[in-house]
Image: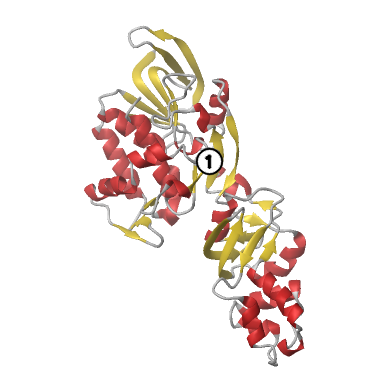
């Protein structure tokens, strides 16, 4: 038996559900096909289980894409204030943690329940455990002048006028991430910007790890820079390398072979500080231990400048040490990959899509939204805002 519907959304995450809700509100018969046993698994674990559902400071500058202008239309038409209004309507308590980041007061489950309720009210049918086996475009639907899409799952066959791909990227593979969206895009002849891990910890060389591994768990407030992008937040030393908010942020801009500059004393000119103490008996390690975690200061000195009393350093040596403190150059050996990446950068090329509707230019009726598209947000709720905005844009047109 073939089930006929107006819209099929493949993927029951944030973008897919939001698109389906908007589609259903317009009276479009909409079915969501989710391969996992439940919807919103990534929503559930986000924000430490409290869901960082948007960011009040969201602008196009907070997103990465080969075409940085592509996201502007969708983001302008569905704003953080719009989603906050929805959250408020459902009586979900929330708070701003920092830098415009909004979290649920209790559990991310509240956001999932809100989306499920909205979907139910819009008449959306959600089918979990529906693994798609094939997607085929069939003959044109003469009544609407558009092709039909035939979607076969393990158990059922569907036909629709519109097909929305909201399958996400390759990040957090343990939750069931696959390359389905990219494979389908290639099936329809669409270009792909090579997917890569983003918002992901760095790994370091064995030599640096030998010195820093005992400091696993030490956190520092620093400024991290790469490719003219800079973030001022904490970094965290791990047994494999570097993590923490600042590292996750800069990882989205990093490419293999590039170094990362870390300003260990972002509030100070290190050279002026050292010159103020140039005639003191205090050792370099102890001096830095007053400004940085002591264990880190000792390990850093072992790596870059054997510690001795400050009065024994020349001005040239101070200048060299200061440069390394204000511009500690670290060469990551790589990242921890898609398994630990919070999102996937790259994806379906934006040149293939309408920025207003998310519909493909080559295949009328076929849409791509959310993380599967080459639009990636910074850390702090921006990727959810892209999910809501891109889902809304498509949902108003499918």
Could one spot residue 200 in this view of the protein? yes
Residue neighbourhood size for the residue with mark 1, other residues' Cα within 10 Å, grouped as few (<14), some (14–19), many (≥20): some
Residue at numbered disc 1: 65
Coloring basis for residues: secondary structure
Residue found 56% across the figure and 69% down from its top? 219
Q: Residue 357 appears in which quarter of the rendering?
A: top left
Residue 105: x and y in percent read: 32, 59
Residue 119: x and y in percent read: 29, 35
Q: Is residue 215 above or below residue 110?
A: below
Q: Is residue 64 above or below residue 159?
A: below
> Which of the pair 275/328 is nearer the observer?
275
> Which of the pair 204/357 is nearer the observer?
357
Residue found 72% across the figure and 50% down from its top? 257
Where is the C terminus found, in terms of image quarters? top left
Residue 192: x and y in percent read: 58, 31
Where is the N terminus found, in terms of image quarters? top left
Could one spot residue 124 in this view of the protein? no
Could you tell whether 39 is left or right of 347 in the image?
left
Q: Secondary structure at mark 1?
A: loop
Q: Residue 259 appears in which quarter of the rendering?
A: bottom right
């Amino acid at each position: 038996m073939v089930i006929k519907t107006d819209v099929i959304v493949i993927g029951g995450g944030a973008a897919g559900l939001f698109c389906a809700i908007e589609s259903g509100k317009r009276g479009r018969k909409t079915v969501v096909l989710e391969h996992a046993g439940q919807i919103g698994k990534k929503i559930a674990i986000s924000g430490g289980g409290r869901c960082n559902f948007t960011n009040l400071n969201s602008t196009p500058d907070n997103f990465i894409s080969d075409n940085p202008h592509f996201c502007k239309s969708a983001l302008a038409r569905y704003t953080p204030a719009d989603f906050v209004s929805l959250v408020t309507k459902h009586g979900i308590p929330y708070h701003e943690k920092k830098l415009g980041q909004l979290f649920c007061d209790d559990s991310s489950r509240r956001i999932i329940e809100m989306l499920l309720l909205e979907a139910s009210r819009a008449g959306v049918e959600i089918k979990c455990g529906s693994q798609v086996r094939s997607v085929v475009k069939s003959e044109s639907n003469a009544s609407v002048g558009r092709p039909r899409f035939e979607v076969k799952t393990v158990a059922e066959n569907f036909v629709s006028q519109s097909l929305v791909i909201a399958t996400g990227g390759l990040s957090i593979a343990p939750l069931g991430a696959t390359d389905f969206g990219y494979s389908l895009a290639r099936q329809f002849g669409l270009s792909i910007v090579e997917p890569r891990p983003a918002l992901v910890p760095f790994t370091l060389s064995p030599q640096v790890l030998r010195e820093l591994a005992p400091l696993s768990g030490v956190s520092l407030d620093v400024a991290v820079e790469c490719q003219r992008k800079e973030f001022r937040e904490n970094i965290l030393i791990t047994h494999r390398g570097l993590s923490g908010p600042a590292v996750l942020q800069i990882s989205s801009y990093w490419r293999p072979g590039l170094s990362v500059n870390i300003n260990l004393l972002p509030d100070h000119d290190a050279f002026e500080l050292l010159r103020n103490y140039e005639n003191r008996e205090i050792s370099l390690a102890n001096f830095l231990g007053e400004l940085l975690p002591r264990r880190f200061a000792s390990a850093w000195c072992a790596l870059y400048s054997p510690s001795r009393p400050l009065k024994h350093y020349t001005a040239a040596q101070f200048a060299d040490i200061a440069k390394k403190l204000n511009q500690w150059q670290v060469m990551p050996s790589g990242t921890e990959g898609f398994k630990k990446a919070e999102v996937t950068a790259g994806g379906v090329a934006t040149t293939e899509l309408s920025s207003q509707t998310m519909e493909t230019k080559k295949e009328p009726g076929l849409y791509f939204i959310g993380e599967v598209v080459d639009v990636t947000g910074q850390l702090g709720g921006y990727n959810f805002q892209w999910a809501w905005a891109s889902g809304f844009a498509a949902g108003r047109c499918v």
